[in-house]
Image (cartoon, rainbow, N blue to C red):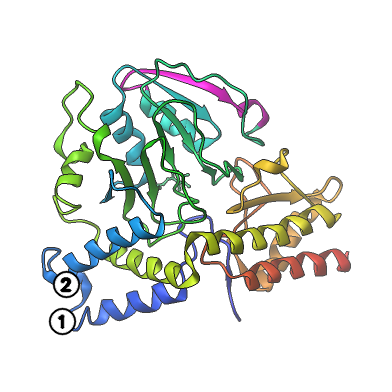
Amino acid sequence: MKKHNFSAGPSILSEYTIQKTAEAVLNFAGTGLSILEVSHRGKEFVAVCDEARAMIKEILAIPEDFEVVFLGGGASMQFCMAPYNFMEKKASFLDTGTWAGNAIKEGKFFGEVNVVASSKADNYTYIPKHYEVPKDSDYFYYCTNNTIFGTELHEDLHVGLPVIADMSSDIFSRPIDFTDYILIFAGAQKNLAPAGVTLAIVRKDALGKVSRPIPTMLSYKTHVDKESMFNTPPVLPIFSALQTLKYYKELGGVEAIQKMNKAKAELLYAEIDNNPFFKGTVTCKEDRSLMNICFVMNDGKEALEDEFAKFATSKGIVGIKGHRSVGGFRASCYNALPLESVQALVDCMREFAAAH
Ligand SMILES: *Cc1c(COP(=O)(O)O)cnc(C)c1O
């Protein structure tokens, strides 16, 4: 049976990415060796790494003054690396969920952390608006897509300060306005590659401004200067990332991908809103994520949750169990998920409703 992979992360990759990765595991670039066993400094892999960085710049139309680097440690490492490199005294944060919360926690190791607004009291069912960001902040920080709670900032914010964003779960899903950013980072395992590599897009002239010494590996400058080759980078995930980037280019780039994501999300949200057995968890509709679509059984239908979960499994639907802090279901509709899979979930919800 065809599987429809709605996993939140690690998550679905394009068939192209998986096929090309499998081929390179057996015979990489005609070397007769597996990509798993060759030097990261060999000309074949250096070409892969350079091409991947160049394609990221091309696909996202990244301005000249930024550099793209591949790092280890997951997106979570960036929660400390960002303040280490950019916070002199104080930074402001928008608290929109667990991942923003983790960044806030790490920020406190480096200076004064100012939370401008939080939707925590309402279990992060919306994204706060109308807040002041103090002008004496070194930067403003937010997470564009809240993977766990299913809310998303659909635009880049401009607050008259440098901005840092965690785009782990919505990078490459829309065009980005780089005007105010000094750092954008994203763990690969949602929209790019297998787990193990983190993408960082760093504004070069924002580096070297904090007074504290920074350990070599935790300094963006190290990786920028050495073009991601200071030490052994995550070779296989970078190779896979390049395949995904080629696939994205073939699809027509981020504008085309955004259109497809909107069509998928509209289809599923319409079913959630119209099917009396289900309801969405995000209270502010304009904040609904196109990537992670959270829903629960409607009032009075709660007892059917396990039954629906089993029914969906029987239809080949994988990975829709909601995060424990929200409950219910979460359908992650990342870039590589075809519309056909969303249609399969919608059909399953309709069939379930008709049978009860
Ligand atoms: C998954 C995720 C993370 C954590 O990524 P790791 O690579 O596991 O550290 C951070 N932020 C967001 C928005 C995520 O979706």
Q: Position of residue 54 (x, y in %)?
A: 28, 60
The region drawn magenta spans: 108-122
Distance from Cα at disc 2 to Cα at disc 1: 9 Å
Query: Residue flagged by tag 2: what amino acid is it?
Result: Glu
Q: On the image, numbered disc 2 is attached to which residue? A: 44
Q: Is mark 1 within 8 Å of ligand 1?
A: no
Q: On the image, numbered disc 1 is attached to which residue? A: 31
- Using the image, determine if residue 267 lies above or below residue 159: below
- Using the image, determine if residue 142 lies above or below residue 292: above
Give the residue at x 28% y 43%: 65
- Depth check: give the residue in front, 10 or 168: 168
Secondary structure under tag 2 reads helix
Q: How many marks overall?
A: 2
- Depth check: give the residue in front, 216 or 36: 216
Circle 2 crowding by C-alpha within 10 Å: few under 14, some 14–19, many from 20: some
259 to the left or right of 37: right
